[in-house]
Image (cartoon, coloured by chain):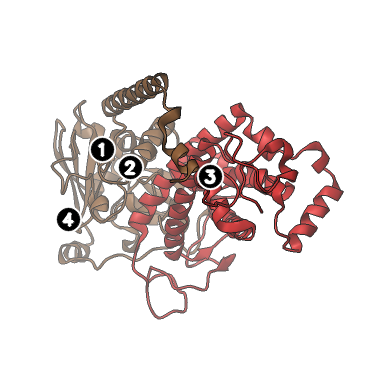
Chain colours: A brown, B red
C-alpha cells in the first residue's frame, strides 16, 4: 500500500471532539426535520403525493408556494391581450353520457355537491348562472409549454361552497369530470381563492365544448391540467385517502404532480 | 508535469521530486462535494428539461404562444404531442410526468447546494482567493495573453494545476453569479403560482413565453459552458484533474513506496 493511500485511510482527522460534534449536529438535524414535518402537516403543507422518490421536491414546492401565495392573485390582462383565435387543445373522445346531455342542449347538466357540507345540492347550469356572474382575463398555460389568454365567465367556487355550507374541518375539494378517468382536487386555499371559478362562459360567449363546455373549473394559479373540463360533481373532504389510490387526483396516478403551481 | 501537491506560494517552480508536503487540498471538501452534487443535478435538469421541451418544441416571445400563433423559432425535432405540427410523421412518447417531478426536485437540491457553496465560499474566502482575478490580471494585456494561449490550445502550465487562470476565474464567476441566478429566475417566472405573488419577475422579462425562451437560451449557455469545461479538463489532463476534484489532491498520480 502506498504511503499516500495509507495516510488517506488512517482516521487521523477524526478526533473524539469532531465525532461528538458531528453526531450532535446530525441528531439536531434529524430532530429539526421531524419538527418541520410535524409543523408542515399541521398547517397543510404536505401534498398527497409526498411519497416516493420525488416527494422531497414536491413537498418543498407545495409548502413554499402555499406559504408565499396563499392570497396572491393570478395576473389579469387587458382585453386587448385576449388570444385570437382562441386556442383549444385536444380533448379525449366524449362519452355517451356527455353526448346525451349535449343533445338536450345541456338543459339536464347537473353539478352535484356533497361531502363535508351542511346542505348537499345539485345545481343546473341556469341555477349556477343565477349567482352574480364574474369574469377574469387570465392566462391558461399548459405544462407542455403553450399558453393563451381568455376571458372566463362564471361563478366563484367559493360562492357555491358558501351556499352548501362547508364544514370548518374541510381541507380539500375533489372535482370530477363526466369522463370518469378525469378528476382532480385542490386544497381550501385554492378552492376559496377569489379567482377559482366554475366557468360557463368564455370571451363573452358560452363556453365551447372544445374548451370544456358547458362547465369547467378554472384554477388560474396552477397549470392547465388542474382546470378540469366537463365538471359534474364536487366533493368536499378532510382527507384524500379514500379517493382513487389516495394520491389526491388522477394526475399522480398517471405520473403527474398533484400540485401544479409550477 | 510532476506528481506533486500544490504549494501555492511557489506554484510556478515546482521541482520534480517534491514530496507531498502540504495538507492543503487542491479543492476543499466543500467545493468537491458541491461540485459533484451540482453535476448530478445539472444532468437531471438537462435530461428532464429536454423531455419537457420535446412536448412543445416551439418558442415564442411575449406573454402567450400556442399552435395557432407565430413562433420565434421551432426546433426541428418531432414532438411528444400529436397536436404540435412538426413535419414528422410520428409522435414521441409522453415523458413529462416524471420529467417535471425530477426537474423541480433537482432544482431544489441545486438551489440548496448552491446556497451552501456561495455562503461558505463567501465566509472561507474561496471567492476572493480562488475566483476573483488578481489586480495584475485585470488588464487588457493579461486578458489577451490568456485568450491567445487558450486559442493556441497550449497545455496549462504547472501554476494552472494549483490555481485557476484568468479565463477560468471569469467564466466560473459568470456561471455562478450570472447564469445560475438567471436560469433560476427565468424558471420561476414560468410558474403561475410564483408570479401571482411576484408578478414583476415575469413582467420585466416581457412575459411568460419570453421567460420560457430565455430559460432555454440560458440552459444552452450552461451546456456550452459544460462542454468547454470538460474540454479544458481533458486538455489539462483528464485523470489528474478528476482526481483533484474527487480526492482533493493535484498532480498526476504515481505509485511511490
Label 2 crowding class (10 Å Cα cut-off): few <14, some 14-19, many 20+? Answer: many
Q: Which residue is mark 4?
A: A108
Q: Nearer the viewer, residue B23 or B224?
A: B23
Could you tell me which residue is drawn at 60 percent across and 26 percent down?
B123
Q: Which residue is mark 3?
A: B184
Rendering quarter of residue B91: bottom left
Q: Secondary structure at mark 2?
A: strand
Q: Is residue B18 left or right of residue B86?
A: right
- Residue A164: where, in percent of width, then height? 19, 34
The answer to whether mark 3 and mark 1 are in CB contact below 8 A is no
Q: Which residue is mark 1?
A: A160
Callout in the foreground (4, 2): 2
Callout in the foreground (4, 3): 3
Q: Nearer the viewer, residue B122 or B63?
A: B122
C-alpha span from label 4 to label 3: 48 Å
Callout in the foreground (3, 2): 3
Which mark is first along the chain, 2 or 4?
Answer: 4
Label 4 crowding class (10 Å Cα cut-off): few <14, some 14-19, many 20+? Answer: some
C-alpha span from label 3 to label 2: 36 Å
Q: Which residue is mark 2?
A: A155
Q: Secondary structure at mark 1?
A: helix
Label 3 crowding class (10 Å Cα cut-off): few <14, some 14-19, many 20+? Answer: some
Rendering quarter of residue A43: top left
C-alpha span from label 1 to label 4: 19 Å
Amino acid at each position: 500500500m502506498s504511503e499516500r493511500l495509507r495516510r488517506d485511510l488512517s482516521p487521523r482527522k477524526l478526533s473524539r471532539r469532531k465525532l461528538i460534534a458531528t453526531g450532535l449536529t446530525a441528531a439536531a438535524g434529524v430532530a429539526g426535520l421531524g419538527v418541520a414535518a410535524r409543523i408542515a402537516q399541521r398547517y397543510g403543507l404536505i401534498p398527497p403525493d409526498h411519497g416516493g422518490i420525488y416527494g422531497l421536491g414536491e413537498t418543498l414546492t407545495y409548502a413554499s408556494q402555499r406559504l408565499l401565495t396563499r392570497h396572491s392573485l393570478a395576473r389579469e390582462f387587458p382585453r386587448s391581450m385576449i388570444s385570437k383565435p382562441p386556442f383549444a387543445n385536444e380533448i379525449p373522445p366524449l362519452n355517451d353520457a356527455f353526448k346525451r346531455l349535449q343533445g338536450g342542449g345541456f338543459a339536464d347538466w347537473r353539478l352535484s355537491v356533497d361531502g363535508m357540507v351542511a346542505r348537499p345540492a345539485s345545481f343546473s347550469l341556469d341555477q349556477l348562472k343565477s349567482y352574480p356572474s364574474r369574469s377574469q382575463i387570465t392566462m391558461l398555460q399548459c405544462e407542455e409549454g403553450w399558453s393563451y389568454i381568455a376571458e372566463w365567465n362564471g361563478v366563484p367556487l367559493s360562492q357555491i361552497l358558501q351556499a352548501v355550507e362547508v364544514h370548518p374541518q374541510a381541507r380539500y375539494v375533489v372535482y370530477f369530470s363526466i369522463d370518469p378517468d378525469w378528476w382532480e382536487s385542490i386544497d381550501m386555499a385554492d378552492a376559496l381563492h377569489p379567482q377559482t371559478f366554475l366557468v360557463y362562459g368564455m370571451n363573452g360567449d358560452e363556453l365551447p365544448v372544445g374548451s370544456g363546455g358547458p362547465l369547467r373549473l378554472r384554477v388560474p394559479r396552477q397549470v392547465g391540467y388542474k382546470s378540469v373540463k366537463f365538471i359534474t360533481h364536487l366533493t368536499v373532504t378532510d382527507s384524500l385517502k379514500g379517493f382513487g389510490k389516495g394520491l389526491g387526483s388522477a394526475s399522480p396516478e398517471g405520473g403527474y404532480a398533484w400540485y401544479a403551481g409550477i | 508535469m510532476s506528481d506533486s501537491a500544490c504549494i501555492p506560494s511557489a506554484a510556478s517552480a515546482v521541482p520534480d521530486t517534491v514530496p507531498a508536503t502540504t495538507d492543503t487540498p487542491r479543492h476543499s471538501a466543500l467545493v468537491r462535494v458541491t461540485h459533484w452534487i451540482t453535476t448530478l443535478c445539472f444532468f437531471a435538469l438537462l435530461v428532464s428539461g429536454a423531455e419537457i421541451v420535446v412536448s412543445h418544441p416551439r418558442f415564442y416571445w411575449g406573454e402567450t404562444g400556442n399552435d395557432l400563433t407565430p413562433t420565434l423559432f421551432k426546433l426541428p425535432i418531432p414532438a411528444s404531442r400529436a397536436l404540435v405540427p412538426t413535419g414528422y410523421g410520428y409522435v414521441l412518447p409522453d415523458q413529462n410526468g416524471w420529467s417535471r417531478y425530477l426537474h423541480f426536485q433537482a432544482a431544489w437540491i441545486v438551489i440548496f447546494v448552491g446556497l451552501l457553496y456561495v455562503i461558505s465560499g463567501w465566509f472561507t474566502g474561496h471567492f476572493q482567493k480562488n475566483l476573483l482575478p488578481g489586480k495584475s490580471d485585470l488588464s487588457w494585456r493579461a486578458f489577451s495573453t490568456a485568450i491567445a494561449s487558450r486559442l493556441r490550445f497550449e497545455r496549462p502550465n504547472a501554476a494552472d494545476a494549483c490555481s485557476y487562470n484568468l479565463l477560468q476565474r471569469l467564466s466560473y464567476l459568470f456561471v455562478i453569479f450570472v447564469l445560475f441566478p438567471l436560469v433560476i429566475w427565468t424558471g420561476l417566472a414560468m410558474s403561475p403560482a410564483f408570479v401571482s405573488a411576484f408578478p414583476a419577475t415575469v413582467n420585466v422579462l416581457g412575459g411568460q413565453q419570453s421567460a420560457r425562451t430565455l430559460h432555454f437560451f440560458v440552459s444552452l449557455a450552461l451546456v456550452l459552458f459544460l462542454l468547454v469545461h470538460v474540454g479544458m479538463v481533458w486538455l489539462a489532463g483528464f485523470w489528474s484533474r478528476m482526481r483533484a476534484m474527487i480526492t482533493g489532491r493535484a498532480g498526476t498520480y504515481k505509485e511511490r513506496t
